[in-house]
Amino acid sequence: MNKNFYKLFQYLFIIICFLLITKTILEEKEIHNIMFNIDIYKFFPAVIISVFLVLVYSQMIFKISKQTTSLDISKKNWIYIFLNSQFYDTVPFAGFIYKAINLKKYKLEYKYFIFIYAFIFYSWIILYLFLFFIDATIISIYFGTIKYFYISLIFLITSTTFFFSIKVIHYFSNKLSSNFIILSKIKELVLFTNKNLIKKNILVFIKSGTLIHILEFILYYSVINFLQLDLSFKVIFTIFFVNSFVDFFPITPKNIGISELISGTLMSLIGFNFTTGVLIRVFIRLSSIFATIFLFLINNMFFLNNEK
């Protein structure tokens, strides 16, 4: 019942966001002027960047999975399963279930599949909070305002707190009895996370996560260039930071509707029209969708040719 209520809430939230977005865009009457002047071929680099983002993310999960479990799979088979799952993710949880079922054939039990993604999620929070610390510090330098530096320190403290929290949880969980199945599984997950939060895995997250973060900024820069917007580096970086932070807390699936609304509002606040901000987010999404479709088609064509 609660799950259905939450789903209903999400759908209502998306509808409200899109109604507000549509109303504002129609009032501004700027969309025709923006779309009329764009060169569609300049959108191609954004799709290429999104392709690289998917591949880097795939490689990161592959390395972490191999280093933390008994997963026995070739890189070719991993890429085939992962890229297909990305395409199936257009339906909520379909890609996740597809990966779990197919990776079980390669000695990855369902329990450890869940553990890996929980471990990646936890590590991703730590890393991205630290990257937000760096981003906010850069913004404070650009704007010459100390309050942004204080915000950056909050990110740093929160990241550090999350990093050491698993050690504390692990210490106390060892003192608790685990007669209940759920408590027993939670203890196993805590043990798995604590055991694998080691140098070689941390380095994989730092290298891959930093590269992904940089590529995401380049993607924003590419889409803004495609839309022929005359924005300074400082403004582009601010747009990237705010949108990245918002997407870190998804309320709806992939924050659809919310990201567009906030992006449009942000652009209005810094002296541009609402429509421009919405279009930036729309084309960021489209680049990801086109990249996913492209990789899915190439992946299956390549695999089928090798099977013959």
Image (cartoon, helix red, strand yellow):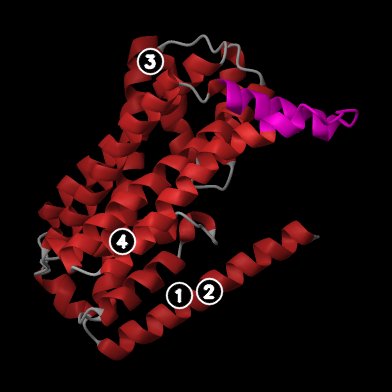
> Where residue 169 sits: x, y (%)?
68, 36
Q: Are marks 2 and 1 in contact (CB under 8 Å)?
A: yes
Residue mark closest to the camera, 1 vs 4: 4
Residue 68 sits above or below residue 7 on the image: above
Sequence-wise, the earlier of marks 1 and 4 is: 1
Calculate the distance from the C-alpha at mark 1 to the C-alpha at mark 4.
34 Å
Q: Which dot, 2 or 4, sits closer to the camera?
A: 4
Check the picture and name the quadrant holding the N terminus.
Answer: bottom right
Residue highlighted by disc 1: 18
Q: Which mark is residue 15?
A: 2
Q: Amino acid at mark 3?
A: Lys
Q: Secondary structure at mark 4?
A: helix
Check if mark 3's residue and mark 1's residue have beta carbons within 8 Å. no
Question: Left of 194 or right of it: where is 24?
Answer: left
Q: Residue at x 16, y 74 (%)?
A: 34
Residue 69 located within the stretch drawn in magenta: no
Mark in the foreground, 3 or 4: 4
270, 160: nearer the viewer: 160
The residue beneath circle 3 is 76
Residue segment shown in magenta:
170-195
Farthest right residue in view: 179
Residue linked to disc 4: 149
Residue 142: name its quadrant.
bottom left
As drawn, 139 above or below 287: below
- At horizontal 39% and vertical 14% (from top left) the residue drawn is 75
Mark-to-mark CA distance, 2 and 3: 41 Å
Structural distance between the alpha carbons of marks 2 and 1: 5 Å
